[in-house]
Image: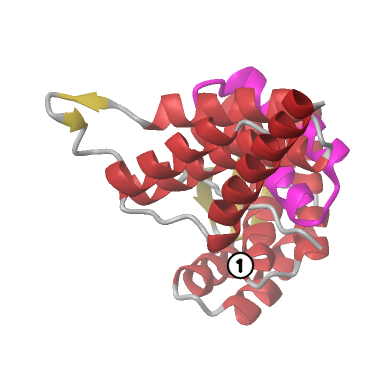
Amino acid sequence: MKKFGVLLGGFALVCMVAACGSSRKIKQGSEEFSIDEGAYLEAMSLQDDGMYFEAIKAWQTVLKDEPRWALGNFNIALIYDQLNLVPEAIEHYELAVRWSEEHNDDANARALYNLHLGAAYVRASLPKEAVDALKKALATDQFNPYVHFNLSSAYIMRKDYDRALMHADSAVDLAAKPGPGGLDESVDRAELGKFILRQAECHLERGEWEKARTALMRARKQCNVEATPRMWDAIKNGEAAAKAAEKEGSEG
């Protein structure tokens, strides 16, 4: 089975909480409810320390009392994702999206939840569901290169290479900030290199050998990121086949 890359950018969410005895008040959109403060603090601490299985148990305690908490579901989904337990991650990403939408939660939070949900759908080889979730993220966060990168992955899976290339191009354009002598120093060259390789993959699927070669050379020169031998072989074989076909046509 062919694997498609999934990348996710960093994020920052502020949880609106107020301590009240042994409980915490949670503000989620237009609604306010309480969670167990001790379990919440334990879950956050365990998650921060990378003690994922213990953190899952703590988050389950929190969510048992208040299963509608979107950010709680998102956090436990992140842990499942880190452990490569994709079905479990999807389940909780879906709950995060559901409750954030039903309670009219912050639009940036909803976009983040949909980005992670869409990326998880890609990993689960569910391109239609991935496109639906990522389009929701894109509606709010249209300048996020990771949304475009994952949309490109989903469209490649659907063999819609035109849309895949369009989003791969957008990911590269958004990540490649120009500087005085080339790329700006703030650019994450490793990430940009992966975006450029996605461009190349789209060109390969479209039979655009020279454009694919140019993309691979750019990834090497600008980002010090090397393509796989498979990609170089695809260009070599594609160009050879094109020349053979051209020769056969001229002789005919």
Give the magenta range. Answer: 117-144
For label 1, the crowd category at 10 Å Cα-Cα, with few meaning under 14, some 14 to 19 and many 20 or more, is few
Tell me, yes or no, if residue 135 can be seen here.
no
Who's the residue at 81% across and 38% down the image?
Answer: 98
Label 1: which secondary element = helix
Quadrant placement of the C terminus: top right
Who's the residue at 70% across and 63% down the image?
Answer: 62
The quadrant in which residue 23 appears is bottom right
Tell me, yes or no, if residue 81 can be seen here.
yes
* 238 relative position to 195: left or right: right
Q: Amino acid at mark 1?
A: Gln
Residue 45 on the magenta span: no
Q: Position of residue 69 (x, y in %)?
A: 72, 47
Q: Nearer the viewer, residue 211 or 6?
A: 211
Quadrant placement of the N terminus: bottom right
Q: Nearer the viewer, residue 44 or 206?
A: 206
Residue topped by disc 1: 82
* 238 relative position to 50: left or right: right
Residue 136 on the magenta span: yes
Who's the residue at 61% across and 74% down the image?
Answer: 55
Q: Position of residue 203 (x, y in %)?
A: 61, 34
- Residue at the limit of the structure toward the front, as seen here: 251
